[in-house]
Image (cartoon, helix red, strand yellow):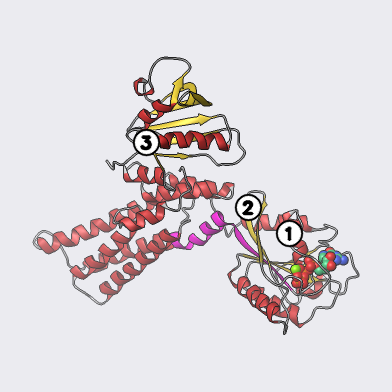
Amino acid sequence: MYRTDTIAAISTALGNSGIGIVRISGEDSIEIADKIFRSLKSDKKLIEVSTHTIHYGNIVDENDIVDEVLVTVMKEPNTYTRENIVEINCHGGALVMKKVLNLALKNGARVADPGEFTKRAFLNGRIDLSQAEAVINVINAKNNMALDVSLKQLKGSISNVVVEIRKDILHEMAYIESALDDPEHYQMDNYGEELMPKVLSIKSKLKKLLDNADNGRIITEGIKTVILGKPNVGKSSLMNFLLGEDRAIVTDIAGTTRDILEENIKIDDISLNVIDTAGIRDTNDTVEKIGVEKAKELAGSADLIIMILDSSVPLDDDDKEIIKLIEDKKAVVLLNKSDLNTITDDKTVRMFTDKDIINVSIKNEIGIDKLTELIKNMFYSGDITFNDEVYLTNERHKYAIYESIKSLDCVVDSIESGMPEDFLTIDLMNTYETLGSIIGEQMGEDLVNEIFSKFCMGK
Ligand SMILES: Nc1nc2c(ncn2[C@@H]2O[C@H](COP(=O)(O)OP(=O)(O)OP(=O)(O)O)[C@@H](O)[C@H]2O)c(=O)[nH]1
Ligand SMILES: [Mg+2]
């Protein structure tokens, strides 16, 4: 067991919530709690009570009562960290929680590093690394769907896939080793031919994980939604409308928005990172030019583009250039200012694009519900399924899978060029180890620290 000092932190969000938990974990956590807790129900010390019990009393600073609390005592090993844990449920707000934490620190605990509770759970073998990282995602999940995926990952869905694949690889490596040691009992003839389909099948499983990785990103980080269009078509107006507040400056002067503006917007459970851009046009203004370039760049990396056209003016070359930008992307076209005289209608626009076209008046708030409906449909339908799939929501996992596929490609090459079997083992071994890094086997200490430093305090 990984043993260290006793740590403490405020484990709930430091908002205006009226209740919060100070968590203490480590060998001395119960003794430390005893120094600052006075039971209102019994004379027993916390160190004497049974495990997994709750106690009512006061937190005291010498003779001053700091807060009236419920204290949960959980003795090792059946706890989150596998160490002794005391959780103090305070009634007070942020200030009181800080006082309680400080008392714990004064009496022998040390303030926990971000993610240190979960790190201990990992180091003590209670969860594997991909589960630990899923905890980060649970904490950071921006919408219910993300939460769903993270919870699945927490239950070990990625670990399961990886563990299965590693088992298969290990089996093959063991076979090769045995055959090299004991050629009389193990057949090596045509082994390459037998191995090939197995390698290809593993590769396609990994490939599937990787292909889903981008959906995974969409789910935790939000859909990168870029609002694109010429100056003055109403991009910032849409941003403000979706946000429900006047965040972006709206004027009738073309070229108002010169830099990008990014905000998180929710539609149902879907989290969108909406980006308002500078209107795209040929311009000589240096600042505006940079904005325009940024807008084009963003269009390239967007998950979804909302392109806006002004229906009260003729379609021009600038519009047509932007339509080209969205050709290969998921995109919707809004034909704005439907309250004015129509010069450009949807039939005209249809000649240049096959994307959905929606007539709206952003100013009068007409038709935008159709946009949100469409976004919901795009998200919930076909392309992005999230029910039974395993998603990689984490860049490190993604990279490891990518590397594993590369080493499997080497195995394929070696089989094809008839290399001796011990060559195959080397690349199989690489794959095995790289995959191991996802579940925390074969890990350098630096990497462990880096991963856990991403956690919030108190988790
Ligand atoms: N009549 C009418 N005017 C609108 C509508 N939507 C936006 N406008 C007006 O169009 C003008 C430009 O709106 P913005 O939202 O600033 O346009 P933008 O696309 O962000 O412009 P740039 O930042 O310059 O690229 C403002 O005067 C808005 O009030 C609409 O539906 N109808
Ligand atoms: Mg603008």
Q: Where residue 424 sits in the image (x, y, percent)?
A: 23, 68
> Under 8 Å from ligand 2: the CB of mark 1?
no
Which one is closest to the eye, mark 2 or mark 3?
3
Q: Residue at x 75, y 65 (%)?
A: 236
Specify the label residue 247 is tagged with.
Answer: 1
Return the residue nearer the eye: 157 or 51: 51
Return the residue nearer the eye: 39 or 12: 39
Mark 1 and mark 2 in contact? Answer it, CB < 8 Å: no
Q: Where residue 296 sits in the image (x, y, percent)?
A: 64, 75
- Residue that carries the numbered disc 3 in the rendered image: 108
- Residue that carries the numbered disc 2 in the rendered image: 270
Q: Image quadrant of residue 306?
A: bottom right
Specify the label residue 315 is tagged with.
Answer: none
86 in relation to 270, above or below: above
Q: Crowdedness of circle 1 by 10 Å Cα count: few (<14), some, many (20+)? A: some
Return the residue nearer the eye: 325 or 378: 325
Is residue 406 left or right of 428 when viewed as pictured? right
Q: What SS does tag 2 mark?
A: strand
Q: Crowdedness of circle 3 by 10 Å Cα count: few (<14), some, many (20+)? A: some
State how far apart marks 1 and 2 are (Cα): 21 Å
Q: What SS does tag 1 mark?
A: loop
- Image region (quadrant) for ligand 2: bottom right
Mark 2 and mark 3 in contact? Answer it, CB < 8 Å: no
Q: Crowdedness of circle 2 by 10 Å Cα count: few (<14), some, many (20+)? A: many
Which one is closest to the eye, mark 1 or mark 3?
3
Q: If you read the primary sequence from the N terminus, does the residue marked by circle 2 or circle 3 appear first?
A: 3
Identify the image quadrant of the N terminus: top left
